Image (tube, helix red, strand yellow):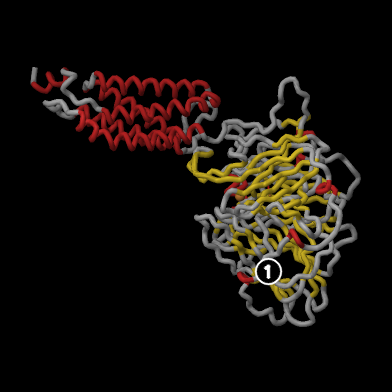
Amino acid sequence: MTNETRALRAPGVRPRPYPTALFILGSAAIHFSVAPMHFQEYVPFGLFFVSAGIGQVALALGILTVPARRLFLAGAAGTGALIALWFVSRTIGLPIGPHPGRPEAIGFSDIACVVLELVSTLLLVRAAFRRPKSRRRGPVRIALTTAPAVLLTTILTADGVGSAINDMPYAFNASPIVPGQAATNLALLTEAPGSEPVKTFTLTARVTRIKGQDAWTYNGTVPGPVLRVTQGDRLRVTLHNRLPASTTIHWHGVPGLPDAEDGVAGITQQAVTPGHSMTYEFVAREPGTYWYHSHQDTSSQIGRGLFGALVVEPKGGPTESRDYTVVLHGAVDVSAVAINGTTGDLHLDARPGDTVRLRIVNAFAPGMDGGAETPVLLGAPYRVVALDGRDLVQPQVLPAERLPLGMGQRADVVFTMPTSGAVRLVDAAEKGEAAFSIPTTRPATVTVGDGPAPGAVDVGRLPLFDLTRYGQGGADPVAAAHADATYPIVLEAQGGFHDGRIELVHTINGRPSPYVPPLNVREGQVIRLHIVNRTPEFHPMHLHGHTLSVLRKDGRPIEGSPVHLDTILVGPHETWDVAFAADNPGIWMLHCHVLLHASFGMSMTVNYAGISSPYEMGSRSGNVPE
Ligand code: C2O
Ligand code: CU
């Protein structure tokens, strides 16, 4: 027997591989933490992860008690096999399971786990071929050599376990059927048949090359076509999905929209898969400026170009001689605000003396600060006649001011063309205080009419339009009504785990979506919301299917015209009180329209008693409403 083989058989002599054992235990912890999700997906997968974890715990204890070459080699082979299996599942897909042959997405937790496994495999191989030391190490030595491993394992294990237990849910229903309680399936809440004139549209969602970029478009353009109808029309809009991903259409702000036509993936419908179609049908009951956009993977799909304006003209046609839609949005090719598809100057025709209505839609997705666009009209006195498509009472004439519009909001401005010269709309922005906002250029302008354009103005110094003291009079029965309930809506943000990632998690009442407890209402109630913004960011809060009456800003009642919105811009550290009549049964989203914030958790639902949803969000259905 040589010295070396004798040493291999003498357990006490080979140093105990504490760091290696730690790495193995770290990846075991991650395996245990992902097991529950895999059990939901496919029981054999769940069993596999539990057994992998148990095997790793046994291996770690084994190499500490019997540090023998054979055990090291067996451990390295086993761990290597786990890595190989992971690699196959992420590239060509496993041949078994619920989706054989389909590669899985790479997540935070599996990266942490594979790193731990790689390191432990290398250490196991090294330990197997290393010459044993003749002397035992003292406790100080052991502590020093183990410290880096403790640090690395702690970080990776915390990341891996944290993202695994905060992953996107496998299946989450916003309003499941409760056994023993009668409930109406929201899929039945469609538009009732009627004799309204039918307006038919087709929107084909497809990939279109625009300025060298692959945009996702409706009918080949960004924004999609303006859908113009008359109050009282019945819209029948067929969506054809030619995209490589599933999609939907949401009709943002349309009063009285039936819940089943709301277009929210995983709440009011199953997202339309590639190659399939769906027809939305609803009656345009109220005139106004609205818009439409995808509500599947919204933050990404609106960003790629899936949005457009919806205009409902009053019966009898437009009240102004010129009626234009002006959509502010992200340019496809550069980081800039574009208007109706152009980053330059958009020219609109008008003659001296014409009355002009600009229907301004803010579809521009801001950065993390949630900043609002603040377009300015120069060259003519004007009135803001409507906000979010709802008329204001006795709006007075204004000088040049910045008109704050959070993402999703609309404003209609009306003016008379001067006897000479053009009128110009200049885009500016109001930034929040948060870090990480991406600098954006705002070169886009709109010039209305011909002749010299108004001279340049330092728009940053102009006052901000204040909707709490504009126009006058008018009754607001919802604002005046006794409230059946008042709910706090507390908006916060802090670093943490959400949907399997480390993010600036955005919460409502302390929790991120889909775990924000819903607001439960009954048909016929009047509900008040006390919205508190505890962040340095802007949050345009949008309630689907309803109209919000503005009551107070920072505790002070509004003084001018009643203000009715579907999206309320809540500035940094502001508090707003609003009320709405629960008059449209369904399950409705209430979320921040800064799509980043919504996808980071700032989203919840308003649930009517007695309504259930047959749809689910999460990784099983592929429905991702934010
Ligand atoms: Cu503009 Cu939830 O939508
Ligand atoms: Cu927000």
Question: Considering the image in quadrants, where does the N terminus appear?
Answer: top left
In this figure, which residue is indicated by the disc labeled 1? Answer: 376
Q: As drawn, is 535 to the left or to the right of 106?
A: right
Seen at 73% across and 42% down, the residue is: 278
Q: As drawn, is 559 to the left or to the right of 264?
A: right
Seen at 83% across and 55% down, the residue is: 287
Where is residue 541? Give x, y as percent: 67, 49
What amino acid is found at the position of numbered circle 1 in the picture? Val
Up-down relation of residue 75 to residue 193 (above or below)? above
Specify the quadrant of the image occupied by residue 328: bottom right
Q: As drawn, is 559 to the left or to the right of 197?
A: left
Work out whether residue 5 or residue 514 is closer to the camera in this orientation and state it: 514
Q: As drawn, is 558 to the left or to the right of 105?
A: right
Residue sitting at the far front: 555
Where is residue 274? Give x, y as percent: 63, 42
Q: Is residue 212 visible?
A: yes
Specify the quadrant of the image occupied by residue 187: top right
Work out whether residue 125 or residue 239 is closer to the camera in this orientation and state it: 125
Where is residue 486? Give x, y as percent: 73, 40
Up-down relation of residue 457 to residue 587 (above or below)? below
Seen at 65% across and 53% down, the residue is: 570
Q: Is residue 311 visible?
A: no
Q: Secondary structure at mark 1?
A: strand
Where is residue 506? Give x, y as percent: 57, 44
- Whether the residue carrying mark 1 lies under 8 Å from ligand 2 is answered with no
Question: Considering the image in quadrants, where does the C terminus appear?
Answer: top right
Seen at 59% across and 39% down, the residue is: 510
